[in-house]
Amino acid sequence: MFRSRLGPYVETSKAQAIMVRNSYRGTISVRSIFCPVCLAWIALGATILVGCDVRQSKSASVQKKIPESAGSTSDSAQSEKLKSGEPELGSLSHEDLDATLWLQTSAEYKAIAESTYQLAWEKVQIGLTDPRWSALELQSEALAEQRTNGDSSEPRLLQPAVILDIDETVLDNSAYQAESIKLGREFEPKSWHEFCERAESKAIPGSKRFLDRCRQSGIAAFFLSNREHDVTEATIRNLTDQGLLLPEEKGRVLNKGQQPDWSSDKETRRQFVAKDYRVLVLVGDDLNDFVSVGFKPQSSERRRIADAQRDSWGRIWFILPNANYGGWERAIYGWDDSLPRGEKLKQKHAALISSNQPAEAAAPEPNK
Ligand SMILES: [Mg+2]
């Protein structure tokens, strides 16, 4: 910027100074140096040379300082940065920018979310009238076994229910992503915890209508989230404020760690619900919201699991897009969240497929 604005001036003046210096070196006699015109040229050239040096060293010093200040993460500094509205250096090319904008501004995301919940509701209505219908593998296997054994009696009548994930399924946390982008930071547990405590996430399009319809039809809704147990109260407050949960239903929010065997694998919680409820549909934004995927599965294994369940998608399982984060992303860098951000980005670049070769051949999977 500095160079482009003052370039012609600086270059011309420099040339003049060099010309004076060269003249002094070779072709001008000692006496001629003391003539008024020559003295004026020498003084002008020296002034310009000194001025250029000062400006250039100032400019270099400012350029050096910018990256140092960009990493400041104190709470008050972050708050000031968010208030100022000035983009933080580095945030302009943040890896979550497009995905967050797509979710927050596009008509397409809204249409997909509304479509997903509309289709889920249509399948719920079908499942409601079929006492053998279940979205859970074990439950549907038990019902199928009843048929195989020639048992014509009606299966034990269980109350109908639906199971939903919370983050990016019924609650839109893109405000957290937006804050992270503006501050040039990646996900961190402390700021995420604080965001959850604020309880200000909005409802995902279509989710409230779906839950209202379920409630009106006597269908219970359970929320299985991998949020930490210490934000359960804030999560319930957020869901209630958005009209997604009634105060008397707060026992249906089942967070990770609430019981000893409730790990990040949601299967034990799904089975907990299945003891007393027939689960009509599952709704989520991650493969883990539907099926147990094992320990740190690689991308190819996750795709294999999704392929094996192709009869479930859009019939009993309904998934919303999440291009910001999830198991898909962590699988790319081997589930090692402690890796420096730059290393994660390198591994993501290495995983890109830029030809027709199979994904596995494009880049080796990182070690588990
Ligand atoms: Mg989620």
Image (cartoon, helix red, strand yellow):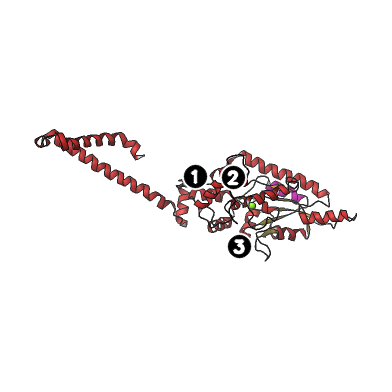
Q: Amino acid at mark 1?
A: Ser
User: Between 75 and 289, which is closer to the camera in this rendering?
Assistant: 289
Is residue 179 at least partly visible in the picture? no
In the rendered image, residue 225, in percent from the top left (x then y), is placed at 65, 56
Alpha carbon distance from label 2 to label 3: 41 Å
Look at the image and give the residue range highlighted in magenta: 207-216
Q: Amino acid at mark 2?
A: Ala
Mark 3 element type: helix
- The label nearer to you, 2 versus 3, is 2
Label 2, on which residue?
Answer: 362
Q: Amino acid at mark 3?
A: Asp
Name the mark on residue 93: 1
**Whether label 1 touches label 2, CB < 8 Å:** no
In the rendered image, residue 188, in percent from the top left (x then y), is placed at 53, 56
Instruction: Confirm whether the magenta stretch covers residue 210.
Output: yes
**The C terminus: image quadrant:** bottom right
Label 3, on which residue?
Answer: 230
The answer to whether 275 is drawn above or below residue 99 in the figure is below
317 relative position to 84: left or right: right
Q: Earlier in the sequence, mark 1 or mark 2?
A: 1
Type of secondary structure dominating the magenta stretch: helix
